[in-house]
Image (cartoon, rainbow, N blue to C red):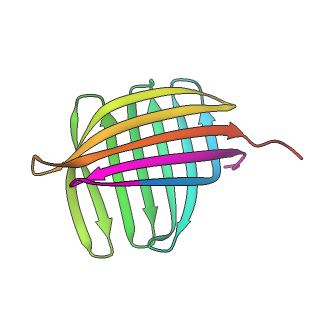
């Protein structure tokens, strides 16, 4: 899998009234076509060490996010208006969370593009917050 794209990931998290914004820029692999593609990238953080994330987009309507790293795994399925249960494993234990996609939009081809999704989270049907991801993917320039 060749990491021949750059991806900028802007995340906005609103949990229990607190808001946090984060931007990550890293190398990525992009395979597939406009409606069905896979975006894979790695990132490094002090808290979690190195993690690898794969985002699969199916028909521009269903997003699957699989993330794993040192002591943690996450598996999220997003379909607009449908509540899915996601599984999260951390060094402190495992838990499940309800995930309901609020917005999904994708404009991607083999050169790159954009992906946006926003979802609401809950624990045992008690609202927790909302998380928004905006991805901008571009083919790296050859030097």
Q: Percent x, y for residue 124?
A: 10, 51
User: Please, is residue 129 above or below residue 49 in the view?
Assistant: above
- Which one is in front, 85 or 45? 45
Q: Percent x, y for residue 140?
A: 76, 43
- Which one is in front, 66 or 13? 13
Q: Say if residue 140 shows up in the picture.
A: yes
Question: Does the stretch in magenta take in 9?
Answer: yes
Is 9 positioned to the left or the right of 125 in the image?
right
User: Please, is residue 106 above or below residue 73 in the view?
Assistant: above
Question: Does the stretch in magenta take in 101?
Answer: no
Residue 88 falls in image quadrant:
bottom left
User: Please, is residue 49 above or below residue 56 in the view?
Assistant: below
Stretch of the chain drawn in magenta: 1-20
Residue drawn at (47%, 55%) of the image: 22
Q: Percent x, y for residue 127?
A: 15, 47
Is 7 positioned to the left or the right of 84 in the image?
right
């Amino acid at each position: 899998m060749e990491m021949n794209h750059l991806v900028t990931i802007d995340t906005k998290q609103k949990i229990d009234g607190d808001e946090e914004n984060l931007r990550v820029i890293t190398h990525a692999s992009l395979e597939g076509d406009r409606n069905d593609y896979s975006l894979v990238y790695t990132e490094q953080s002090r808290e979690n060490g190195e993690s690898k994330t794969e985002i699969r987009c199916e028909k521009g309507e269903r997003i699957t996010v699989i993330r794993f790293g040192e002591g943690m795994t996450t598996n999220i399925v997003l379909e607009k208006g449908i509540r899915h249960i996601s599984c999260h494993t951390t060094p402190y234990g495992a838990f499940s969370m309800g995930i309901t996609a609020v917005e999904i939009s994708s404009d991607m081809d083999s050169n790159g593009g954009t992906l946006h999704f926003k979802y609401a989270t809950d624990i045992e049907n008690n609202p927790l917050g909302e998380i928004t991801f905006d991805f901008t993917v571009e083919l790296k320039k050859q030097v």
